[in-house]
Amino acid sequence: MSHSDAHSAISNTRSVDWELMKRKAKSIIVHGVVLALVAIMLLPLFYMVMMSFKTSTELAQDPLGLPDSLYWGNYMNALSSMGYVRSVLNSMGITISVIAVVVFAGAMAAYPLARLQNRISRLIVMVMALGLATPNFVTITPIYVIFRDIGLLDSYLGIVLAFAALKLPLAVFFYTSFIAAIPLELEEAARLDNCNNWQIFWHVIRPLLAPVTATLSLFVMIMVWNDFIYPLLLLTDKDKLTVMIAVYKFVGNTGIDPTKLFPAAVLGSLPLLIMFAVFQRKIMAGATAGAVK
């Protein structure tokens, strides 16, 4: 090897090493920024949890400091006073029922809209999409009056139907764009096997909707679980209250007691965090598959 070739090889090696160092430094910076943003987002949650273990005296003396010890009395008081288990079961039952209705009805409505591809179907999809921009306070009055007249106030059926009607436009919007990307050849092959429209939807289209269904279910679950207005106005029986309304009634609206507020806030959000942790892999897999599709 000549002197010039050796010099060129050394220069190339140094260039490669320099590029690797730059990439490594860039990766460290990016990871550092991401970790810092995650820490900033989790800081309020950490503060809420820590404050829930402090006594009223500790809160008055040092509002921002860590508790000297984990005081469980706040949680015992909240659990015994707010009917926590019953309210969580109510919220879970309502949320699961709404997801089932929205997924089934939304997929069935979106299938013909995605396949017709004419002006009427596009107009219907646009009208449904407008429902996403309608605030809840606009629809609560007509829904309340209608449910009062037909006897659905203070009932599980009423609150499920109300939530399902509100979230159905989101489902149609999700499913229509997804079904439109499914090749027509799959349906044509099914028709050659003498499948009717219902059989094609149930045996061919429906299994392919699993990714978008996982993503849609996550959105609906968060919105229904955290909704405050509709359960407050449509449910009056204390045995039917959702967890958010139970938290509100426990904390009260005349004054804020931190020894009630923080443990109630933790208990109110805890079931949702647990459900998200349990189904995290399926939700993320569904979102990723939907993006690839």
Image: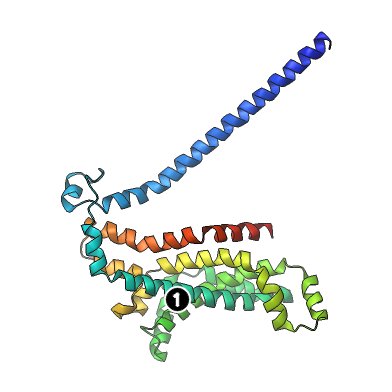
Query: In the depicted view, which residue is nearer to us: 144 or 249?
Result: 249
Visual colour scheme: rainbow
Secondary structure state at the residue bearing disc 1: helix
Quarter of the image for residue 28 reads top right
Residue reaching furthest bottom? 150
Residue 206 coordinates in the image, percent (x, y) = 66, 73
Residue reaching furthest top? 3
* Horizontal side, residue 140 vs residue 125: left or right: left
Residue 140 coordinates in the image, percent (x, y) = 41, 76
What residue would you read off at disc 1?
Answer: 139
Badge 1 density bin: few <14, some 14–19, many ≥20, Cα 10 Å: few
- Whether residue 209 appears in this view of the structure is yes
Residue 187 coordinates in the image, percent (x, y) = 77, 75
Residue 76 coordinates in the image, percent (x, y) = 23, 62
Quarter of the image for residue 247 reads bottom left
Identify the residue shown where x is 21% and y is 65%.
254
